[in-house]
Amino acid sequence: MTQNNANSKPKVLLIEDDKDLLEMAEAFFRPKGYQVVVYEDSNLALKDLEKKKVQCDVIVTDLNMPNLTGIEFTKACKDSGIATPIIIMTANKSIETALEAIQAGAYDFVVKPLNFIQLLVAIERALYLNKVEGENNTLKDAVKIIEGTHFDGIIGKSEGFRKAIDLAKRVANSTANVLIMGESGTGKDVIARMIHNLGDRKKAPYVAINCSAIPENLLESELFGHAKGAFTGASDKKIGLFEEAEGGTLFLDEIGDLSLPLQAKLLRVLQERKIKRIGENQFRPVNVRVISATHKNLKSEIGEKRFREDLFFRLNVIPIQIPPLRERKEDIIPLAEFFLRKFKALNNSQVKGFSKLALDRVLTNPWRGNVRELENAIERAVVLCVTDYIQAEDLPDNDQASNDFSARVPTEKRATFDDGRIMKLDDIVKQYVKYALKVNNGVKDKTAKDLGIDRKTLYRKLEEGFAETM
């Protein structure tokens, strides 16, 4: 998917030992915008294809070749995993020959003497259907990855990520609670779905909830349900997510944001395997595997008395750590190319790949938002790109966050250090804390960690007015 050169014409590999026919084919196709690569030896063509010395969009080969016949060549290509569509030329008009060619894996066949218009139509149809098939396969893979059912296709070959995947596969059939840890956007939900779909509970419900996305006064009802009239607005009974996930898996995302009272109730459920709806006295047994996830350091939260240690031990039976994208450099380009194929198909885009400078920017960007940020950036680039290849300017600049911050600060308050004016230290600290908060999307835990201070110090600075709400 990368840009090798500026020439994006479709490339036809033509295998024929009739030199006159080769010359006529070249003369016909080149003016119509096709690149033509010719071989007089099918065996040599096969070797070059296998070694990737030559790449093409469609192959046209004669049936009767001295080394490998067209059918033998087609079978050999399929055995080698070469998926390029093959069109066979033959002087034999029999149906048996045509069927043999198709059964060998050929896309189509044309009869000699050649009608070049007919051959052109066959090539264009092969190119179009191959493009559609590729886009459909990409979309299917994308859906499977989202649903956690495409295990071999989960993109990531870095050691840390593969360790996480291997551990997830090993524990899938157990009933043990799993705690997935990693920064926001690293794909914790994908791992949770994968564990569910690989295990014995895959035919039962998979239910997910983000504990930080629902107000505390509603979260208890969402988890455990409520009786009719249990509180104002409870006009009917409600089944909670624990009951909805019966026999299956409940994924509690951002478990670190759960309030202490709800932590106590969750601990009781995990210990007793029973829930009680709000407004009821009846306990109901539940059979649910709990997978939880957090971007927070729960051990630090325990030290700050914001998370229960006993609940942590209940949840942390099988810990899985997902490394951030900046520590998985070898995964960045494969992920970017997958997202390119995905959004190219979704948006019916004609974008062919990335320019070299664009790939350099993709690789060197810190991607503080991890895979989610990378995915959003590629989607935006595909939608807005006006050339055949995504350019560096279609992607976020590595220093864009810094530049955006600078643009928001009035000129007279910027710390330029080159105008002979001395700024107050408090003003510099104030600007930098604002910048750090912005970079971390307002997440105070990560901001404090990046600044090398504890949360209490950060909160104190906020209270003192060192940084306003942005």
Image (tube, rainbow, N blue to C red):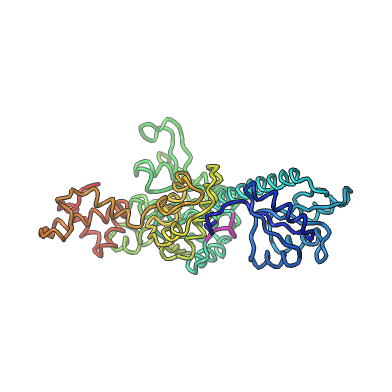
Give percent across and percent down for residue 259.
Answer: 33, 50
Q: Position of residue 186 (x, y in %)?
A: 44, 57
- The residue under the point 29% across, 51% down is 442
Magenta segment main secondary structure: loop
* Residue 271 visible in rendering: no
Instruction: In the rendered view, tell whether residue 14 sits above or below residue 276.
Output: below
Residue located 36% across and 50% down the image: 262
x and y percentages locating residue 354 in the rendered image: 49, 55
Q: Quadrant of the N terminus?
A: bottom right
Magenta segment: 150-155
Camera-nearest residue between 102 and 455: 102
Q: Is residue 176 visible?
A: yes
Is 19 magenta? The answer is: no
- Observer-nearest residue: 419 or 20? 20
**What residue lies at 31% left-to-right and 59% top-to-bottom?**
446
Kindly identify the residue that appears in the image at 17 percent across and 50 percent down: 411
Within the image, what quadrant is residue 12 found in? Answer: bottom right
Q: Is residue 183 left or right of residue 33?
A: left
Query: Residue 65, located in which quarter of the rendered image?
Result: bottom right
For this view, does 77 lie left or right of residue 99?
left
Q: Is residue 372 above or below residue 77?
A: above
Q: x and y percent of residue 72 in the render? A: 80, 62
> Which is more toward the observer, 413 or 142?
413
